[in-house]
Image (cartoon, rainbow, N blue to C red):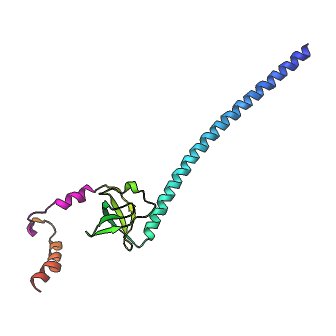
Amino acid sequence: MTQSLHQLSEENRVHKDLIKELYNVALQETAIQSEIKQLRKDLLKHKEHETWTENALFSLQQSGEMIGELIKPLSAEKFIVKASNGARYIVGCRTCIDRGLLKPGRRITLDFTTLTIMRCLSNQTDAMVYRMLDEAPGDVTWSSIGGLDSEIREIREAIELPLTNP
């Protein structure tokens, strides 16, 4: 009987050791799963950055783009845009651009050679530039510009004198 109690006690100890080991393995698995989840988030972030970098590189490799404003969509594929030089064009659009973003007033970039809409830009305006559009300097004389005598002389020599003494 003592031998069976001893054997039962030994089995209980082994059983407890196995449960502790199983618990430790479960904790390790939870930690590994958490680490895998974080690594997947990091991978997604790096893929997004890679895509952004590739797009920026692609833009640099292109012949050039000009900024314009979408005036009106004519169809799903044709749009009226106003280029930065003031001209208006009927243009197409790259297939990878979300058509939902192409609303009147949206800033876009146009390829110089094909006049195709290449990208949608944010509609942010620089407040300083916007204010300068309506700002009139008023009556500014040379005497109101102080401390720049040598610069004023250079400007007069380069611009004013050739116009007054051809």
Return the residue nearer the eye: 10 or 99. 99
- Residue positioned most to the bottom: 166
Residue 163 percent across, percent down from the top left? 12, 81
**Residue under the image location 39 percent in, 71 percent down:** 64
Answer with the quarter of the image where residue 137 lies. Answer: bottom left
Q: Is residue 29 left or right of residue 3?
A: left
Return the residue nearer the eye: 131 or 82. 82
- Residue positioned most to the top: 1
138 inside magenta stretch: yes
32 inside magenta stretch: no
Q: Is residue 123 left or right of residue 46?
A: left
Residue 19 percent across, percent down from the top left? 74, 27
**Residue under the image location 28 percent in, 56 percent down:** 125
Quarter of the image with the C terminus is bottom left
**Residue under the image location 90 percent in, 14 percent down:** 2
Establish if 40 lies above or below 166.
above
- Residue positioned most to the front: 75
Q: Which residues are magenta?
A: 125-143
Q: Is residue 15 left or right of residue 99?
A: right
Residue 149 percent across, percent down from the top left? 14, 71
